[in-house]
Amino acid sequence: MASFQTPIGMRSSTMLETSCGYLLKELQMIWDEVGEDQFDREKVLLDLEQECLEVYRKKVDGANVSRSRLHQELAEAEAEFTHLLLSLGECSLPGRPEKMAGTLKEQLDSITPALREMRLRKEERMKQFRDVQGQILKISAEIVNENDDSTPIVIVNENDLSLKKLEEYQNELQRLHSEKNERLQRVEKYIDTVHKLSATLGIDASTIITKIHPSLDEPFGRSKNISDSILEKLKRTVESLKEEKQQRLEKLHSLGKALTNLWDLMDSPYGDRRLFSHVIRLLSVSSPEISDPGSLALYIIEQAEAEVKRLDQLKASMMKELFIKKQKELEDICNKSHMEIPSRLEMEKIINLINSGEIDHVNLLTSMDEQILRAKEEASSRKTIMEKVEKWMLACDEERWLEEYSMDQSRYSVSRGAHKNLRRAERARITVNKIPALVELLLAKTKSWEAERSKVFLYDEVPLLAMLEEYNALRQEKEEEKMRLRQEKKKFQTQVAIEPENIYGSRPSTSSRRLSNASINGGYSNAITLNRRLSLGIQQLGSNSTNSANVGTSFMKEGKTSPEQHTPLRHNLVSQIRDETASVVSTFSGPISP
């Protein structure tokens, strides 16, 4: 009973009197009245004590569980508070003591407001992080060409919600905003450039821009694609338009120069030129300086091309006439100087090329002018020699006339004009005597001319040196023939003088050996004929200029002409002269009778 009363004694006296003690007294009174056995009383009191202990143990266990839960809640609150402080990057919360005192409930009640405040701070910081990271993801998607209207999924790292980290994200967002603005400016600049270039070229800018990306042609305020691929496409488009602009400007420059040349060449009136004054103005303008709408449109180029084509056709007909005129001038120069002239066939080919438009008219006229200039230069270099050749030709004419005059039996008769012929014969003999020196001078000058220019000096397509050397050879033959005839004549005269001495002696027959006067006169006649033929041959060479215009096959050849090409012409003359010489020689081939 003492053990039972010990916990009861621990209670307050009021509770003993009102609860357990009162009831125990009442139970004892009942047992006394009933006469309950002492053993049973002890047993009942022992059961009562056990039941009380059980109740107290349950209450203690419940109190222990509650205390443990409070400890856990307090520890969790402390841990969460510490984690929030660390994740938010704060050292402590103002107003909360560092060391807590009091019961567990008091400590828990003291940390709960601070924990609530830290949770609110976390939510607000999370919201800030979501907003900043969402903008970063959206702008990044726009830059990498992942433009999507759906809200990006933002994952916030709750372990690091410090202001430092938030500032890093904000700096990144600021950098992306700057890059986005810079890209938008570049896009706007490219679009503006495309519009200006398209206006200058007469092209629809909206079609070009929409083809790159539809968002680029949307009204102001709508999101435009600013990705690297779009910027690259815009850059290539601008470069392509600038290249097209440069090509069209160069085309118009070429057409403008062609128009100017054609106008100047054909002396076009101001009215025709005024229609294409806008094309001519572009000749002094560079590509960056052109910005007028439609100034480089395709229809302007097509109109200029059509005008150039029309003027080219008109020029072709004029060029044909001008070419023929220059060809005639070239032929006149060549004929006058007895040079090789272009062939008619070659000229016809060039005229056909002019008609077909397969030859550059400017280059053709330039070439013709060059040919005429070279022909004039060569004619000038040949002038001295040609003057000597003319003198030689005239001297040969005088020689021929003198030979014919010498054959005239009535040259000494007293008739009208005979004294004039005598004076002319005297002058002709003086001229003929100068022929050898003139020929030698011509040979020297011709050789010097050929050595200086490394080409053959042609006279009506015949080498002049060959003509001169042939003339010298024939003249030498003629001189030798004359000398032989003199010797024969002298021998004949001697024999005629000896004949009277043998008049009384026996005279052998001389019918077959003695030359008659007719034979002698015939021999002289043949010699004179040889001389005349020689002169006539030279004269014939001099008159061949009108017949040799169609012989040449090249357009003012610069190379040497092979003498073998002209052998037939010279051979005919030489053969004719040699035949006459042989006929003269054959007259005196027989023996002469004494």
Image (cartoon, helix red, strand yellow):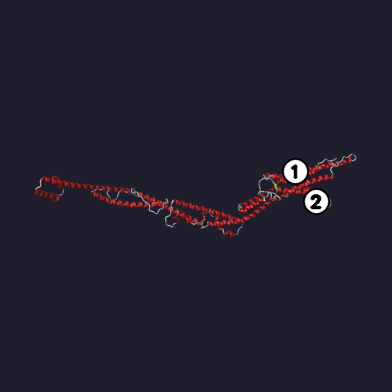
Quarter the N terminus occupies: top left
Q: Nearer the viewer, residue 576 or 530?
A: 576
Query: What amino acid type is highlighted by mark number 2?
Result: Asn
Point out the tag, 1 or 2, that comes first from the N-terminus.
Answer: 2
Query: Which residue is under mark 2?
Result: 421
From this view, report whether residue 473 is shown above or below residue 420: above
Could you tell me how far apart the alpha carbons at marks 1 and 2 are, in whole angstroms?
A: 30 Å
| In the image: residue 280, left or right of residue 210 | right
Q: Report if residue 291 is visible in the image.
A: no
Dot 2 alpha-carbon crowd within 10 angstroms: few under 14, some 14 to 19, many 20 or more: some
Instruction: Classify mark 1: helix, strand or loop.
Output: helix
| Direction bottom: furthest residue | 271
Quarter the C terminus occupies: top right
Residue 361 position, x and y percent, is 61, 53
Exactly how many numbered labels are in the figure?
A: 2
Dot 1 alpha-carbon crowd within 10 angstroms: few under 14, some 14 to 19, many 20 or more: few
Q: Residue at x 34, y 51 (%)?
A: 126
| Direction top: furthest residue | 506
Q: Quadrant of residue 218?
A: bottom left
| In the image: residue 322, left or right of residue 474 | left
| In the image: residue 473, left or right of residue 293 | right
Q: Report if residue 517 is visible in the image.
A: yes
Q: Residue at x 32, y 52 (%)?
A: 123
Residue 316 position, x and y percent, is 62, 55
Residue 473, label in figure: 1
Query: What amino acid type is highlighted by mark number 1?
Result: Ala
Residue mark closest to the camera, 1 vs 2: 1
Instruction: Classify mark 2: helix, strand or loop.
Output: helix
Residue 63 position, x and y percent, is 21, 48
| In the image: residue 26, left or right of residue 162 | left
Residue 201 position, x and y percent, is 51, 56
